Image (spheres, rainbow, N blue to C red):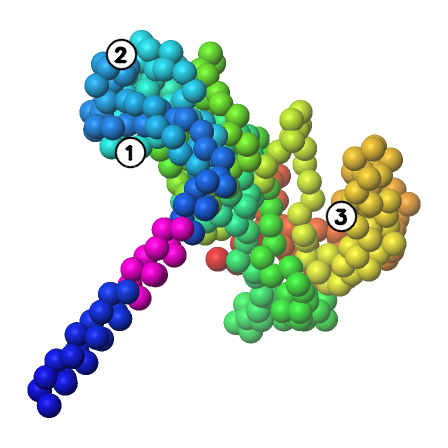
Amino acid sequence: MTSRKTLILIAAIAIGTVAAYVLWSYVQGVKTDLEDGAQRTDVFMVITDIPENTRGEDAQRTSIEVREIPNDIKPANAVTDLAQITGKVAASTMVTNEILKVGDFIDPVVKQTSFSDLLPEGMITASINIDRVRAAGGFLAPGDEVNMMILQDGWIQLEEDEDDGIVLSAEDEAYNIATEATPYQNPARFFYQKVKILAIDNQLSPRAGEEVVDTGVTVTGGGIITIAAPPDAILRIMSVPSSAIAFNLLPDGYEPAVWNHVTADEIVLDVLPGEDENFLTPYGPGGYEAFINGETDGSAIAFDDTAGNGISPRSGAPAPDEEDAADEDNPFDGETQQDAAVDDTGDDTGADENPFAGTGE
């Protein structure tokens, strides 16, 4: 009986060995087929670690070799000629099996330049950590100019105060209802326009005369965005929570302009652009093509309750007249309570020094 069990065990081991070999052979065959079918290309590969500040000529002699890899994993900015690193030094330590890329070796003068030397005179930096969505979908790059937006935290609710004799009017009640019903729950405003991005994480913007390799469109996923601006602007930027900041990419030739943000008048009227024949699309009734072809005036698609014909283009409702605008009990005729909070006339509210009034925070 013992002999029989031994034979069974030996047979099982033999079968397992054969099965393992068959599986290994199959996997190797598939791997070979895939490698044979893939296009391959030469790259310069690091074969031994290259310490920071190593001269390019020294690295070529001891630490770099040509290796063949599948073409689809070759970086778009891979070095194609070792002359590209001659006379330069390693920007940081490079490790074995790393593919040599443009920017891994830089000019020694640049290497010795401190980050502060890159700042224009009269400017300081601010760094903002934002996610991919608010970083223009992750399509930002060092050197870009962007518009900086703030996304306000809702609307201020008006409240009665019997001790001070403050009683809400019908218009006040309508405003409070509108602030809860409106889809504009995070009213956006342009905080600054054409803001210069100096760096994203540890990647600096290119400088004049520096070689730039076009690697196509890159999605960064957001990160730490470092901008440069005068100190007074930086003070205001750093006063806003990073969670309330978003960036917009700009086209070449963009010129800053004043754009009307969502106001209390607009939310009370409760007419959305897509419900108004004067708007319909973000580009006006003619659509995208008409807008980019110059057939639609961009100013015609901005909310304006002071139109010369006395009609608000957003709502079709009569614009407030001068007599109604003077009615202090109606915050929606003329200047609203919301607008008064950010009045820049310099009156005793001091709001011209407070760009965050009316944020609801």
Q: Earlier in the sequence, mark 2 or mark 1?
A: 2
User: Where the N terminus falls, by quadrant?
Assistant: bottom left
- Looking at the rendered structure, the secondary structure element under dot 2 is helix
Q: Is residue 243 magenta?
A: no
236 or 281: which is nearer to us? 281
Name the outermost residue toward the left. Answer: 2
Please state if 136 lies on the left or on the right of 82 as rendered: right
Res. 97 mark: 1
Please state if 108 lies on the left or on the right of 357 as rendered: left
Q: Earlier in the sequence, mark 1 or mark 3?
A: 1
Q: Is residue 27 magenta?
A: yes
Q: Position of residue 185 (x, y in %)?
A: 60, 61
**Mark 3, residue position:** 282
The reply to whether the C-beta atoms of the residues labelled 2 and 1 are less than 8 Å apart is no
- The amino acid type of the residue labelled 1 equals Asn
Residues drawn in magenta:
19-29
Q: Position of residue 323 (x, y in %)?
A: 82, 53
117 or 335: which is nearer to us? 117
Examine the rendered structure and indicate whether residue 101 appears above or below residue 4.
above
The residue lying at 58 percent from left, 71 percent from top is 160
Main SS of the magenta part reads helix
Please state if 167 lies on the left or on the right of 55 as rendered: right
The answer to which quarter of the image holds residue 9 is: bottom left
Res. 57 mark: 2
